């Protein structure tokens, strides 16, 4: 399969921007990327600064909303597109609890539009890859793992909207024969993650001497994956995954939230010893739990490992250290994303304005 012109949606977000950097350097991809992004609060053109200059013939940015069917069809035809890799989404669970409508619009209608465009221009179309999440499977108890055969049991408006989009992708393969693949991944972390998500929020608050909010008892478990490993897994599935199939992607790295927060405090204390001599752990603050908070996610990715020979490269300890160093080195990026809109969200969610 050779992809010549790839629409990549949501390329200015956290994972999409890491994926564009990864793919443009991959020796087995020589095609062109058309990055389609609406630039919501989570989309940041600065995440790809220098890319247009370095790859003038292989990278194009188009600001567009995937919910705009006519504009998306126009872009598809203009660039002779033969594949779509679909990252664009409203992605933050807490926002979906407070403001669900936009999640249904972008995640369901937006995905439907892209599938329709691909279906009705299917002649030279080689692949629709859909980026999804382990959250569609709901919550685990102390035992067990999510496999590709686990039932869908989404618990938040975000995960329900992602589940709906997964079903549409599946239906377009079964009904129309559209060449599709889906990947359901666990929690990512790494450079360029917007600081509404746990790890960057805690790193930045700890750097800035602010309280470190931990929901409930802090014992909820996520399975963490360094973002570059996710990128490599997605490209592996796009190249060699069986069409019509779903592949789980995970990090083999289950952690309780409280343990992560303590690790961040300890790493920062080691890298920049606090002037007060007191550990940053003292800033940990237990706050009201998230409604419907999923207790545990854990991924069985043996299908991906056995069929396509992928394994994560980064350990959580090394990935977390790299991530902290990236945030410490990128103060101006942090200053710019902590905009007015960001401060409004922090005030709404945590009940206190940023000082
Ligand atoms: P993000 O919120 O950082 O980025 C989303 C991007 O999509 C932004 O650039 C935004 O501007 C763009 N976008 C949003 N609505 C759009 C629209 N209507 N039209 C065009 N562009 C739009 O998200 P992320 O964390 O990078 O997640 C990317 C994808 O990966 C999502 O589909 C998410 O569900 C999935 N995912 C994320 C994780 C994670 O841990 N972050 C894990 C598994 C799966
Ligand atoms: O599992 C994959 C999913 O991971 C993705 O599909 C989502 O797009 C992504 O946002 C992420 O969802 P989570 O809800 O797991 O991530 P978040 O970083 O919001 O929260 C991680 C855990 O930390 C969760 O148990 C809630 C908790 N938490 C989060 C925040 C923001 C806190 O304790 N305090 C906080 O301030």
Image (cartoon, helix red, strand yellow):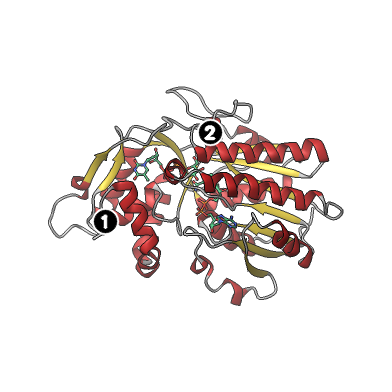
Q: Residue 19 location in percent, x, y?
A: 58, 57
The residue sitting at 66% across, 76% down in the picture is 56
Q: How crowded is mark 2: few (under 14 residues within 10 Å), some or many (20 or more)?
A: many
Furthest toward the left, the residue is 276
Q: Are marks 2 and 1 in contact (CB under 8 Å)?
A: no
Furthest toward the right, the residue is 123
Q: Residue 211 location in percent, x, y?
A: 23, 49
Give the secondary structure at mark 1. Answer: loop
Q: Which label sits in the foreground, 2 or 1?
A: 1
Q: In which quarter of the image is the C terminus?
A: bottom left
Q: Residues within 10 Å of mark 1 (few under 14, many from 20)?
A: few
Quarter where residue 288 is shown: top left
In depth, the one of 238 and 122 nearer the eye is: 122
Count of residue discs: 2
Give the secondary structure at mark 2. Answer: loop
From what the image shows, is residue 163 above or below residue 265? above
In depth, the one of 146 and 159 nearer the eye is: 159
Q: Residue 311 location in percent, x, y?
A: 57, 42
343 relative to 67 in the view: left or right: left
In depth, the one of 173 and 149 nearer the eye is: 173
Mark 2 and mark 1: span between their CA atoms?
Answer: 37 Å
Q: Residue 143 location in percent, x, y?
A: 46, 22
**Residue 338 visible in this rendered orientation of the protein:** no
23 relative to 282 in the view: left or right: right
The residue under label 1 is: 353
From what the image shows, is residue 24 above or below residue 84? below
The residue sitting at 42% across, 31% down in the picture is 292
The residue under label 2 is: 299
Q: Which of marks 2 and 1 is nearer the N terminus?
A: 2
Quarter where residue 274 is shown: bottom left
For disc 2, does the CB lie below 8 Å from ligand 2?
A: no
**Residue 50 visible in this rendered orientation of the protein:** yes
């Amino acid at each position: 399969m050779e992809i010549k012109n790839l629409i990549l949606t949501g390329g200015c977000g956290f994972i999409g921007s890491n994926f564009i950097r990864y793919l443009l350097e991959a020796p087995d991809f020589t095609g062109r990327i058309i990055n389609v992004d609406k630039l919501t609060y989570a989309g940041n053109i600065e995440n790809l600064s220098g890319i247009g200059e370095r790859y003038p013939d292989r990278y194009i940015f188009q600001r567009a909303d995937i919910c705009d069917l006519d504009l998306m069809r126009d872009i598809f035809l203009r660039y002779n597109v033969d594949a779509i890799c679909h990252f664009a989404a409203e992605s933050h669970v807490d926002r979906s609890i407070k403001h669900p409508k936009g999640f249904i619009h972008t995640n369901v209608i937006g995905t439907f539009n892209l599938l329709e465009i691909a279906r009705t221009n299917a002649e030279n179309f080689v692949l629709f890859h859909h980026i999804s999440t382990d959250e569609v499977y709901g919550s685990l108890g102390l035992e067990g793992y999510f496999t590709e055969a686990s039932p869908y049991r989404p618990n938040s408006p975000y995960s329900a909207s992602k589940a709906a989009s997964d079903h549409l992708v599946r239906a377009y393969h079964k009904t129309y024969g559209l060449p599709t693949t889906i990947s359901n991944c666990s929690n990512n972390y790494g450079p360029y993650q917007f600081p509404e998500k746990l790890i960057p929020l805690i790193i930045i608050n700890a750097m800035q001497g602010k309280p470190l909010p931990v929901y409930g008892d802090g014992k909820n478990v996520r399975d963490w994956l360094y973002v570059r490993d996710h990128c490599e897994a997605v490209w592996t599935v796009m190249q060699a995954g069986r069409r019509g199939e779903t592949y789980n992607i995970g990090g083999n790295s289950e952690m309780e939230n409280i343990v992560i927060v303590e690790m961040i405090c300890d790493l920062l204390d080691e890298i920049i010893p606090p002037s007060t001599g007191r550990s940053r752990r003292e800033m940990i603050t237990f706050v009201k739990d998230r409604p419907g908070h999923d207790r545990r996610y854990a991924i069985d990715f043996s299908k991906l490992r056995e069929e396509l020979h992928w394994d994560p490269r980064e350990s959580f300890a090394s990935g977390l250290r790299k991530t902290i160093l990236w945030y410490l080195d990128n103060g101006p990026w942090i200053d710019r994303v902590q905009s007015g809109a960001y401060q409004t969200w922090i005030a709404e969610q945590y009940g206190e304005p940023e000082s």
